[in-house]
Amino acid sequence: ALQCGIVGLPNVGKSTLFNSLSNAKAQAANFPFCTIEPNVGVITVPDERLNKLAELVNPQRVVPNTVEIVDIAGLVKGASKGEGLGNQFLANIRNTNAILHVLRCFDDPNVVHVDGSVDPIRDKEIIDTELQLKDLESVEKKLQKVEKSAKTGDKDAKKAVEVLTQVRNLLLEGKSARAAQLEEKDLEHLEDIHLLTLKPVMYVCNVDEAAVNTGNKYVDIVREAVKSENAEVLIISAKIEAEIAELESYEDKQLFLADLGLQESGVNKLIQAAYRLLNLATYFTAGVQEVRAWTITLGMSAPQAAGVIHTDFEKGFIRAEVIKYNDYVNLGSENACKEAGKLGVEGKTYIVEDGDIMHFRFNV
Ligand code: GDP
């Protein structure tokens, strides 16, 4: 599953956000095989299309996409050198696909700031520095290894030295690995060391209720500071999210949002941003037993998309039957689509699109 790690200094609102995001405890029944760690929350991905399909098909169960979020607490100045919870937490970020960097963008004299004042850019730099120092360690360790092989004339190792040196120099300048101008194939040399600062990042500006629509001076400063990064900047009020999480029904949540002049909750904003940032899309399977959403990377072929369900589906792939979401909803059923000639039969080279309703045929 897609995993996002939440980082940020203490008291910026991480736990508040984490608790409210993962409050909608994914129906455990749907996920009998996943063990949930205390710092790992599961968010069900809200998707109107899934609800619409479920209405039409009326299946036994409906399974939404999920995103896991990992609360990485204990990140303080000196963490990479063992301060606070030390290195422990850093291991937790290694396996995440993206980082949510929460920045305190609200004034509140009752909430102590660890560094005495509200300054999201200083905060961001403290966290970035810790992550960069950790990456520097990883890069240097690997450099030592590949330099030896490079001396024996190994071409691949020479290229690795080149790539690693470029990244090391950036890190030494206090920049993140994601700032490196690298080609797709260069990235292979970095894959095994799971660099923290190479992961895509979303900045979550935690603002007061009053600023959630408009932003505030802190948000402006953040936007300006990260302009050159390929990052998403989101405005969220952890406090509002916590209040929404308290509400039981969907209708109550919508009313509450409308009262605040909001179109959608922070969870929605966040998940959409994560999908954009990571180039993800959703396809559906729709049968009487189950209507379900599946996450793929944009550009995946039909067999690859089938592999998301089960590796056997990819190996034994024969063909896929594809209905476009709009056709399905307009015509109301798979049969109606078939009769109207709206059910496409596609082979191995078909590139799955967001919203496709797929039916895979395969050999076992
Ligand atoms: P963490 O240490 O980053 O996990 O921060 P917490 O989520 O524990 O929040 C620290 C304190 O800030 C708590 O007392 C929260 O109630 C408060 N807090 C969190 N978000 C907001 C916010 O948007 N506005 C205000 N005024 N207080 C907040």
Image (cartoon, grey):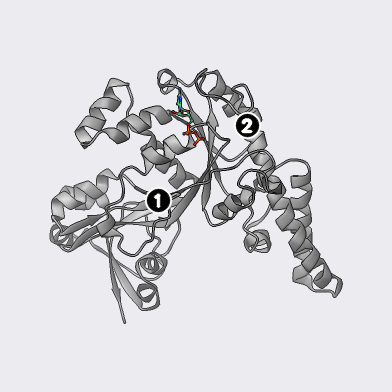
The one of 325 and 307 positioned closer to us in this rendering: 307
- Name the mark on residue 123: 2
Residue 349: percent from left, percent from top:
41, 68
As helix, strand or loop, the secondary structure at mark 2 comes to: helix
Residue 300: percent from left, percent from top:
44, 61
| Quarter the N terminus occupies | bottom left
- Name the mark on residue 12: none
280 left or right of 151 in image? left
Residue contact at pointers 2 and 1, CB within 8 angstroms: no
Residue 246 position (above or below residue 306): above
User: What amino acid is found at the position of numbered circle 1 in the picture?
Assistant: Val
- Image point (67%, 35%), residue name: 125
- Name the mark on residue 67: 1
Name the quadrant containing residue 252.
top left
Between the C-alphas of marks 2 and 1, the distance is: 26 Å
Residue 337 position (above or below residue 50): below
- Image point (36%, 78%), residue name: 316
- Image point (61%, 29%), residue name: 114
The one of 82 and 278 positioned closer to us in this rendering: 82
| Quarter the C terminus occupies | bottom left
Residue 235 position (above or below residue 34): above
Q: Nearer the viewer, mark 2 or mark 1?
A: 2
Residue 255: percent from left, percent from top:
23, 26
Specify few, some or many for label 2: CA neighbours under 10 Å numbering under 14, 14-19, or 20 or more. many
Name the outermost residue toward the bottom.
364
Viewer can see residue 332 = no
